[in-house]
Image: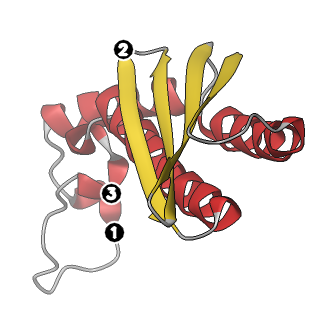
Amino acid sequence: MDCRFSFKQVKRSDVLIDFAQPKIEAKIEKYSTKPIDVHVTFIKQGFDFVVRCTLKGGDNFNSQVEAVAPDVHSALDQMLDKLEIQLKKQKEKLKRHKFPEESNLRHLRLVPDEGLEADWDSLPVDAEDIIKYEKVRHNVG
């Protein structure tokens, strides 16, 4: 992962970079496995600090997150929270793409209980349900 930092209207601070880099890398490594290019910009606007993070990475995922606060450290923490939310959403989208809801075992339709005994062998079985079950069983296991 390539992590770059730039400063606008703010004096370059290695202490700030050493503080921010492990936190950013930890958040990204938690939700992404492919290499990512990260560019973090610290900007001073009036009395506030703006921390902007631009991600370009695997699975065609590009994102930009920005946070504004009176303190540079609190702006960085807010930006990290927003970044985590976006990475989590992206990971969920990838999971749903890989395992669509209709192939999930929880969505298989069962014949409603209409006074039937607990003899499951007597229930009619639809061929589509068996195919769905086998697909899910082989993909998950």
- Going by the numbered disc 2, the residue's amino acid type is Asn
The one of 58 and 41 positioned closer to us in this rendering: 41
- Structural distance between the alpha carbons of marks 2 and 1: 50 Å
What is the residue that sits farthest to the bottom in this orientation?
115
Residue at label 2? 60
- Kind of residue at badge 3: Arg
Is residue 130 shown above or below 79?
above
User: Who comes first in sequence, dot 3 or dot 2?
Assistant: 2
Taking the spot 49% from the left edge, 64% from the top edge, the residue there is: 48
Q: Is the residue marked by circle 2 packed among few (<14), some (14-19), or many (20+) residues within 10 Å?
A: few
Q: Which mark is residue 106?
A: 3
Q: What is the spatial separation of the Cα atoms under label 3 and label 2, in whole angstroms?
A: 30 Å
Q: How many marks?
A: 3
Element type where label 3 sits in the image? helix
User: Residue 119's image quarter?
Assistant: bottom left
What secondary structure is marked by label 1?
A: loop
- Residue at point 75% right, 34% down? 12
- CA gap between label 1 and label 3 equals 21 Å
Quarter of the rendering occupied by the C terminus:
top right
> Camera-side residue: 101 or 9?
9
Residue under the point 27% across and 36% down: 100
Dot 3, crowdedness within 10 Å: few (<14), some or many (≥20)?
A: few
Left or right: residue 95 versus residue 131 is: right
Label number found at residue 119:
1
